[in-house]
Image (cartoon, rainbow, N blue to C red):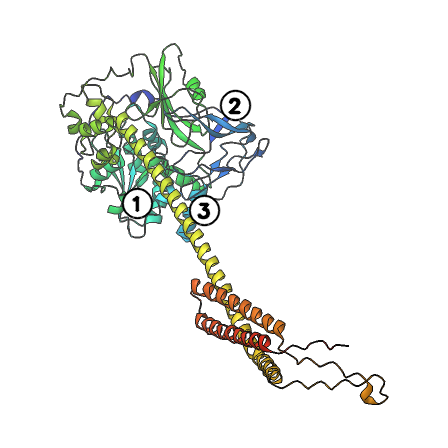
Amino acid sequence: MTQIWDFPGGIHPAENKHQSTARGLLTSSLPERLVLPLQQHIGSPAQTRVQPGDQVNKGDCLAEALGTLGVPVHAPTSGRIEAITKEPVPHPSGLLDWCISLIPDGEDHWGERKPMPDYHQRDRQDVLAHIRDCGIVGLGGAGFPTSVKLKPPSRDKVDTLILNGAECEPYITADDTLMRYRAAEVISGMEIMAWVLEPERCLIGIEDNKPEAIAALREAVGDTRIEVVVIPTKYPSGGEKQLIQILTGLEVPHGGIPADIGVMCQNVGTAVAVSRAIHQGEPLISRVTTITGEAVAEPANYEVLLGTPVSDLLAQAGLDDDRLERLVLGGPMMGYTLQTDQVPVVKTTNCVIAAARGELPQPPPEQPCIRCGACSDACPMELLPQQLFWHAKAEEFDKAEHLNLFDCIECGVCSYVCPSSIPLVQYYRFAKGEIRTQRVEQIKSDQARQRFEARQARLEREQAEKEAKRKQRARAAAEAQASKAEAGEESGGSERDAKAAAVQAALARKGQKPPKATSVQPQDSKSDADKPAPAPRETAGPDLASLEKQLDQARDKLATMETMLAEARAASADNVDKLERAVAKNQDRVKRAREALDAARAESDGAPHATPQND
């Protein structure tokens, strides 16, 4: 026998549940058009795999899952794809989103189904993959993918599996009706999830205001190890954290998940969907939805095909437009007002309230807080609603977050008990939305900064590589020039020696006396003496032009080597020493060439010149 605990706070609002439980579980009529949003869950929208005009069978996959938290969307019946357009969807904003429009053909012809009756012999990962392929998410309102939830972190061992059948919010009786008329499927689905998780205990928590459902479940449990635990009626006992605290006495840590304390909580509707997926191969294409409120003549619970317009359900329940004041999707505590009745039923649609005038009146104008503390006393999460309100209103989001704003489950208890009619939950939702937006912007900013830093690092790396290659080319060129200079020194040595010898020979010749001229014989002499003597020969002098050319060449080569040396020093090349030696050699060569030229010019200026002979 499981011990019952309690959670702090809570309230007891008027239930208004009996109106919709008297007619049993009805089946909604087939609408003329089904509208299937691509995002009916937490996670990325599904990606379409059909085109307008395609003929599909019941259960065919119309859109495949994307990402870890994605789930596919299936055809609720056979028919033709009309369009893929933006349509109104169930959301507080009233905005449009991408949807697949399906025109039923009335045949309700099933496509291929793949049941897994032998799941006990299958790998658990294969069973989880099949649950994901069937598009099953939590039907309690959150829409979290069931396959992901059934695979907790490896560090967390689930000791207790809980099915949530509390359904504490007023007006809603979808789970109550499901447990009354689908109790066997509830137990079957829980057994499958228990096989996956292998917990020590399996509990079904249900409030004591549902005697028919309690009896049906206890009969269906039989000799299994599943225990039906009846808990006191108090709002919000159906909250995941509150139900865990009631049944185990444990509290989910701040920022943690139930698996962190060895507990997992699933909805009874989710259990039915898992049972049908495994035993019959049916994807999630329908759910039980409550249609209630004083503006409908026959409030009831309907087995509804996903994508059915709310207007069709209201018409089937006998909506009186003259009495209708507003439509509320969900319950009066946590639901929101619909902008149009053309929105479709989705996987998380558990209730639609057609409220007549005065049934769910708008709250009076907000008044200043009187600091009565009623909100703090009623808060089931033991938060400080008054301080959270001040910080949210002043947009001091960091202070609100410091006071555990995100632990708020938005149950609406604080707003319900507030004598000043302050819409506290709306302030908290606003603050949460702004914080999430700031986080997204911060992530984008960080990613942009990382991209910029990566780009700068890449540019610097490329510049360094270019500079290294340039230095390498300069070093190679300097080494080539140095090698060429050394080769030139070696080949130019013999040339210089030969030229120096020629200069010395010329100087030696200049040091000899020129031959004397012979006397002039009379003209009438007939002997060889009568012939005119040859003109005196000019002694050969040094080749000044050649020496000047050698000096110019030496100077040019010296300038080239000095330039190479300067570049090598600037680049910190390895051949600086080699180039310095080459420059020194070229400076010595220029010095020797200048001295040779000066000596040749001096000898040339002091040498005698031949004079022309008189006739």
Q: Amino acid at mark 2?
A: Glu
Q: Are marks 2 and 3 in contact (CB under 8 Å)?
A: no
Q: Which residue is mark 1?
A: 224
Which of these two is toward me, 588 or 557? Answer: 588
Query: Would you place residue 422 above or below residue 262 in this image?
Result: above
User: Which residue is painted at 47% across and 37% down in the image?
Assistant: 46
User: Which residue is painted at 40% across and 45% down in the image?
Assistant: 452
Of the image marks 2 and 1, the number of the one nearer the N terminus:
2
Query: Would you place residue 324 above or below residue 310 in this image?
Result: above
Q: Which residue is mark 2?
A: 32
Left or right of 530 in this view: 100:
left
Quarter of the image that includes the C terminus: bottom right
Of the image marks 2 and 3, the number of the one nearer the N terminus:
2
Report, in whole angstroms, how far the alpha carbon at label 2 lies from the one at label 1: 43 Å
The part of the image, by quadrant, that contains residue 569 is bottom left
Pick out the residue farthest to the bottom.
Answer: 527
What percent of the width, then of the height, locates residue 205? 26, 36
The secondary structure type at the circle numbered 2 is loop
